[in-house]
């Protein structure tokens, strides 16, 4: 369930980075948010597979 929410949030942040407001601070905010969501997804996947990193 958490992975599904993270996938949706990541997709929305990427779309907002591309099609959202063209001001630098908004694009940076959306881009950093999508990177953080992708990092959380990678950590969650590694944890579910039993790896330590």
Image (cartoon, grey):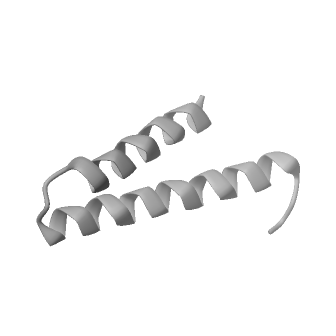
At which x and y percent is residue 9? 42, 41
Q: Residue furthest right?
A: 50
At which x and y percent is residue 39? 57, 61
Is 23 on the left or on the right of 18, as rendered?
left
Q: Residue furthest top?
A: 1
Residue appearing at x 18%, y 62% in the figure: 26
At which x and y percent is residue 18? 29, 54
Quadrant location of residue 31? bottom left
Q: How many marks?
A: 0
**Image quadrant where one finds the N terminus:** top right
Quadrant location of residue 2? top right
Is 23 on the left or on the right of 10, as rendered?
left
On screen, 29 above or below 10? below
Residue appearing at x 38%, y 51% in the figure: 14
Is 15 on the left or on the right of 42, as rendered?
left
Is 7 on the left or on the right of 26, as rendered?
right
At which x and y percent is residue 32? 37, 66
Residue appearing at x 55%, y 56% in the figure: 38
**Image quadrant where one finds the C terminus:** bottom right
Quadrant location of residue 24? bottom left
């Amino acid at each position: 369930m958490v992975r599904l929410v993270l996938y949706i949030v990541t997709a929305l942040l990427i779309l907002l980075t591309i099609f959202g407001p063209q001001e630098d601070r908004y694009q940076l905010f959306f881009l950093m948010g999508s990177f953080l969501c992708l990092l959380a997804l990678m950590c969650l996947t590694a944890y579910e597979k039993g790896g330590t990193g």
